[in-house]
């Protein structure tokens, strides 16, 4: 029986998970941009505070009130630009980006689930093939035993017995290889 080469899919699922995590992170950033460009955030005025002071004549005397005043100046400015309030383009762009990332995340999750189903299907198929190989090995071992009895009685030649033994050894090697590949697939699926 010809063996099928099994491909490890651990790297694929790890890449899928990394891609999903990256899209989720980008989606969180998009949510932040949406909330930062919402109407309520645009209604918030900007506040500017400035101060200045002079080293020369730092304090002056007010003779009317008999008090000393600093010559420093302080200013607080509130501004609410109308163009930012009325222009919702940044907010719309942020909403579009969020929708795009949501659909990309959905597609990545679907692809990851499809890949997981494919890995499970391949694992089940390999387990079925393993059972068939073991049954074939058991039959070949019976044939080798029967051929050795026939050889001892002189009914067959040694080359027929040798071919049967070689075929049994080849099948046994395939069973061992497939067992190793199957265990590696199970380990990789357990890591995911």
Image (tube, helix red, strand yellow):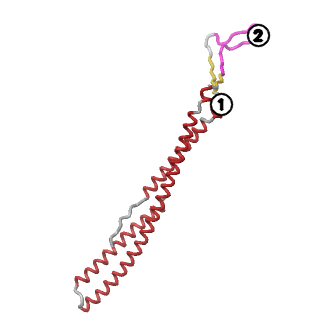
Per the image, the residue denoted by label 2 is 66
Residue labelled with disc 1? 44
**Residue 50 picture quarter:** top right
Rendering coords of residue 175 (x, y %): 37, 73
Q: Residue at x 40, y 72 (%)?
A: 130
Report the magenta residues as a range: 57-76
Q: Is residue 114 left or right of residue 48?
A: left
Name the quadrant containing residue 147: bottom left
Q: Is residue 171 above or below residue 12?
A: below
Going 22% across and 86% down the picture, which residue do you hit?
Answer: 157
In terms of depth relative to the viewer, which is nearer, 142 or 104? 104
- Tell me residue 156's x, y (percent): 24, 88
Q: Are marks 2 and 1 in contact (CB under 8 Å)?
A: no
Q: Is 103 covered by the magenta stretch? A: no
Comparing 110 with 139, the one in front is 110
Secondary-structure class at tag 2: loop
Residue 68 drawn in magenta:
yes
Residue at horizontal 36 percent and vertical 71 percent from the top: 176
Residue drawn at point x = 38 percent, y = 64 percent: 6
Q: Residues within 10 Å of mark 1 (few under 14, many from 20)?
A: few
Locate residue 85, reporting x and y percent.
62, 29
Q: Is residue 42 above or below residue 77?
A: below
Per the rendering, the mark at residue 93 is none
Magenta part mainly helix, strand or loop?
A: strand
Q: Is residue 133 above or below residue 94?
A: below
């Amino acid at each position: 029986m010809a063996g099928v080469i099994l491909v490890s899919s651990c790297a694929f699922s790890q890449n899928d998970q990394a891609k999903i995590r990256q899209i989720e992170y980008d989606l969180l950033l998009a949510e932040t941009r949406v909330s930062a460009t919402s109407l309520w955030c645009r209604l918030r005025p900007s506040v500017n505070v400035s101060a200045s002071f002079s080293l020369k004549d730092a304090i002056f005397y007010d003779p009317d009130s008999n008090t000393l005043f600093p010559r420093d100046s302080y200013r607080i400015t509130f501004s609410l630009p109308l163009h930012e309030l009325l222009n919702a383009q940044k907010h719309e762009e942020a909403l579009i980006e969020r929708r795009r990332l949501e659909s990309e995340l959905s597609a990545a999750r679907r692809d990851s689930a499809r890949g997981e189903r494919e890995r499970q299907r391949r694992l089940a198929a390999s387990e079925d093939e393993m059972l068939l190989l073991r049954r074939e090995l058991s039959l070949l071992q019976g044939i080798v035993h029967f051929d050795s009895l026939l050889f001892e009685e002189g009914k067959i030649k040694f080359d027929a017995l040798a071919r049967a033994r070689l075929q049994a050894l080849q099948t046994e090697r395939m069973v061992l290889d497939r067992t190793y590949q199957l265990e590696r697939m199970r380990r990789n699926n357990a890591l995911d």
